[in-house]
Image: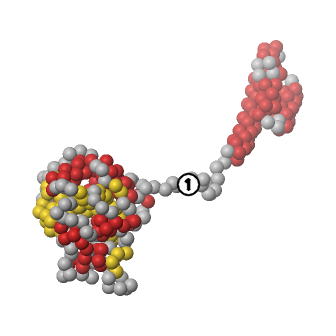
Amino acid sequence: MEQKILEIKDNALKEIEKASDMKSLEEVKNKYLSRASELNNLKKGLKDIPAELRPKIGALTNQVSKEIEALVNEKQEEFYTIELNKKLESEKIDITLPSTYEPSGHIHPLTKTINEITEIFELLGFSLIENKYSPEVETVKYNFDLLNTPKEHPARDVQDTFYSKLGENVVLRSQTSNAQVRQMQNSRPPIKIISPGRVYRSESVSARKNNLFHQIEGLYVDKNVTFSDLKGVLNEFIRLYFGSYRPTRFRNSFFPFTEPSAEVDVQCIMCEGKGCPTCSGTGWLEILGSGMVDPNVLRAVDIDPEVYSGFAFGMGVERLTMLKYAIDDIRLFFNDDIRFLHQF
Ligand code: DAH
């Protein structure tokens, strides 16, 4: 009997060793360990053998069952690992492969503001005039003279304006107001235009100032244009740009090309007029310059100031963008940091 059990064990171990996959192993397991297996039958027949042999034979069958089971488990583990590795291999992701993600372009926040402001003025009847009549490399005549700017005006100083080596009459324009003059030379009233573009100033760069920035110029010339038209248009612009009504203040000011002139303040966006660091405690933020076109400017382009009148305005694009989005450093617009640019 002992012999028989050891024979079963030998066969089982051999067959387990031979099993080539989970399925054949399962068959071997069934054959040797199921209820109907030879070993189990031997266990059942223990009661028929002499009592003194029973403990020894019983222990032996149990031990053989355990050995077979242990080996089956070991082999199963092996197959499982092999299968898992195969699966991992076939599903492997190579993270060193170049990615197929292509970042898409993004509209620059300043372009976005220019587009928004342009749309608002188009709603109010203005037409967009781009660089056609307002070059960035400009003559002193268009940047200053025809804008009624006195010869000794400080804005003409090299401290403020970039003069070109091409000649002392050539400058990088310091304001988009040159567009007014050029437009009026090239067309007759009614004129109702806006003209966005870059301007340059010779000053030291800081969180608030850059050598290069953007302005949007506006001009409306027709019969009977009054200061109340100016106020109406600019108040409406401010309401549409900031998204809701905001108190404004038209403050007496001076520009050589407008008379009277007004700087327009809007109630501080940050503190709602209470006073905070952004508005230097005043509760107001200056956002643009404006005024009634000076008769001298009209005369210089052969428009009769007795027949026609007009208003003009100029606003800084960076400033308006910074106020709307609470941006505290103008240099961010020019640093090409996509983490900043992608927020808009
Ligand atoms: N050109 C002025 C500047 O750069 C802004 C300005 C003020 C433009 C009054 C205008 C205006 O058209 O009427 O500071």
> Quick check: 71 left or right of 338?
right
Residue 302 in view (yes/no): yes
Question: Residue 27: which quarter of the image?
Answer: top right
Q: Residue at x 35, y 85 (%)?
A: 167
Q: Is residue 15 left or right of residue 140?
A: right
* Image point (56%, 54%), residue name: 102
Which residue is situated farthest in the top direction here?
Answer: 48
Residue 74 placement (x, y as % from top left):
73, 38
Query: Where does label 1 land, which residue?
Result: 102
Against 24, residue 176 (above or below) is below
Indicate whether 124 appears above or below 255: above
Q: In the image, what residue occupies the spot 73% across and 36% down?
A: 76
**Tag 1's secondary structure?**
loop
- Residue 299 is situated, as x and y percent measured from the top left of the image, at 22, 70
Where, quadrant-wise, is the N terminus in this rendering? top right
Q: Quadrant of residue 157?
A: bottom left
Instruction: Inspect the image, locate mark 1, and give the three-letter code of the amino acid beneath it.
Output: Glu
Question: Is disc 1's CB within 8 Å of ligand 1?
Answer: no
Residue 34, given in percent of the width and then of the height, sits at 77, 22
Task: Pick whichever, 182 or 166, lies toward us.
Answer: 182
| Image x and y of residue 322, in percent | 29, 58
Q: Quadrant of residue 244?
A: top left
Residue at point 82% right, 37% down? Answer: 20
User: How was this image coloured?
Assistant: secondary structure
Left or right of 279? Residue 241 is right
Q: Is residue 53 visible?
A: no
